[in-house]
Image (cartoon, rainbow, N blue to C red):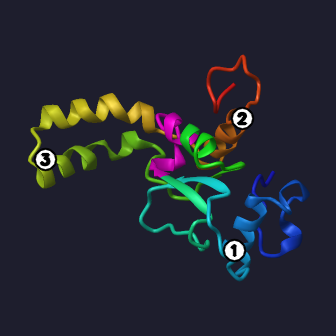
Amino acid sequence: MNRLVSVSRAENIFPIYKDTPIGRMLKYHNLALPFESYSKAELLIGMCMDNRKYLNIPDNFAFIIRTGGANLRHSEFKVSYAIAVGGVSAIALIGHTQCGMVNLVLRKEQFVRGLMDRAGWQRDLAEEHFHHFAPMFEIGNEIDFVLNETSSIEISQDSSCSNAISC
């Protein structure tokens, strides 16, 4: 079963997103919709920090949080800020293939050696750093991660909810 839908035509955008900031983002990025002018952000985009990835969107259209694997865990305050102060009405998570946050354990030696060679770390401290943080930032399968995260992000208007993005 293919869980991804290519957006190569406007008809590929799901009806629920057609006239929303997410639909406009897809049209700007995938379909070369001419840019409109924006004075404030309409959208929060969570995307990977990978240097190979970029977005084709107008200035002022979106807040963008770039983290390894588009993982917004530990970014709750930034997300809440974009909603509460920035006034965004939608959140988009963008993942990609061949993400470095998949199977981090396979990159342990490269990670440790990189900290030793480029930052002067001692091996034991670099290994401890890896072991402490890698489990927090491992995303598993890229598609599963993005699908699971989007289903867990919910902007709630329920006053009994104490967490603005995961109620």
The residue carrying mark 1 is 28
Mark 2, residue position: 154
Rounded to the nearest angstrom, the CA distance separating label 1 from label 3 is: 42 Å
Task: Identify residue type, mark 3.
Answer: Met
Magenta region, residue range: 66-79
Q: Give me the residue at 50% from left, 49% from top.
A: 69
Q: Nearer the viewer, mark 1 or mark 3?
A: 1
Find disc 3 in the rendering and name its residue: 116
Amino acid type shown at disc 1: Tyr
**Front residue (pair 125, 25):** 25
**Residue placed most toward the observer, 5 or 1:** 5
Q: What is the x, y in percent for residue 90? A: 71, 49
Q: Considering the numbered disc 3 on the image, is that residue within a helix, a strand or a loop?
A: helix
Q: Residue at x 59, y 74 (%)?
A: 56
Residue 89 coordinates in the image, percent (x, y): 72, 49
**Residue 142: horizontal and vertical position, in percent?**
59, 48
Q: Quadrant of the C terminus?
A: top right
Give the amino acid type for the residue marked by disc 2 in the picture.
Glu
Residue 122 left/right relative to 48: left
Element on which disc 2 rests: loop
Q: Is residue 79 above or below residue 136?
A: below
